[in-house]
Image (spheres, helix red, strand yellow):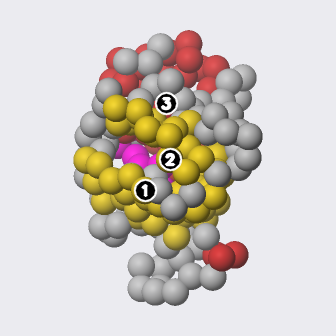
Amino acid sequence: MDIGAQLKAARKKRNLSQRQLAQRTDVSNGTISLIEQNKISPSVALLKRLLEGISMSLGEFFDDEKHTRDKRFFRADEFTEHTFGSMRFFQVGGNLKGRRLQIMREQYPPGGDTGELMLVHQGEEGGIVLRGEIEVTVGDELSLLKAGDAYYFESNIPHRFRNNGEEVCEVISVCTPPNF
């Protein structure tokens, strides 16, 4: 997916200039320009912040209209895959518009990180580490979680995820309301 072109199209669809989006999100218009030209790749948190500035969720941004709201069962090959650098996120349920819960299978390679910019959104978030280990920061608390460990917190508290380990970390996460 061409994230830069997709972001530019979404911004223009809402009749916003780069400068207007920069003012709404506290991100420089130079950074927005570089992202739209695919000269830099945004972190998950930065892309989420930009999309909030245009009133769009990550799910809508990546939506492929592959699934309908009434679908109840999903095979592994039907998950919607999102990639940020070397990190991979597999979303269950396709378009989550109108849904109240988001389920993801997340893969963080060694060095994988949601970014220096902390994630902040409404709702609650939880997950279980299936393999590897992940450093989770929530507010001023930091914890290294290993396979079998879990997290659960109110997601309006700034948070981030980082794999400092030597193997891929895999997490099953849930979030209400959906924000991806």
The picture places residue 93, in percent across and down from the top left corner, at 49, 73
Q: Secondary structure at mark 1?
A: strand
Instruction: Work out whether mark 3 precedes mark 1 in sequence or the reverse, and give the earlier one.
Output: 3
Judging by the rendered image, the residue that carries numbered circle 2 is: 145
Disc on res. 128: none
Name the residue: 25% across, 47% down: 154
Q: Earlier in the sequence, mark 2 or mark 1?
A: 2
Q: Is residue 112 visible?
A: no
Amino acid carrying mark 1 in the image? Ala
The foreground one among 94 and 162 is 162
Disc nearest the viewer among 3 and 1: 1
Task: Looking at the image, tell me whether mark 3 or mark 2 is earlier in sequence order.
Answer: 3
The magenta span reads 54-60
Q: Position of residue 26 (x, y in %)?
A: 37, 18
Neighbour tally class for label 1: few under 14, some 14-19, many 20 plus, Cα within 10 Å: some
Q: CA distance from mark 2 to mark 1?
A: 7 Å
Mark 2 belongs to which amino acid? Leu
| Residue 158: image location, x then y, percent | 33, 33
Rendered view: 106 above or below 4 = below
Q: Which residue is found at the position 61% from the left and 39% from the top?
A: 163
Q: Quadrant of residue 54?
A: top left
Amino acid type at image mark 3: Leu
Is residue 48 on the magenta stretch? no
Query: Which residue occupies the foreground of this view, 45 or 10?
Result: 45
Q: Residue under label 1, please give it.
A: 150
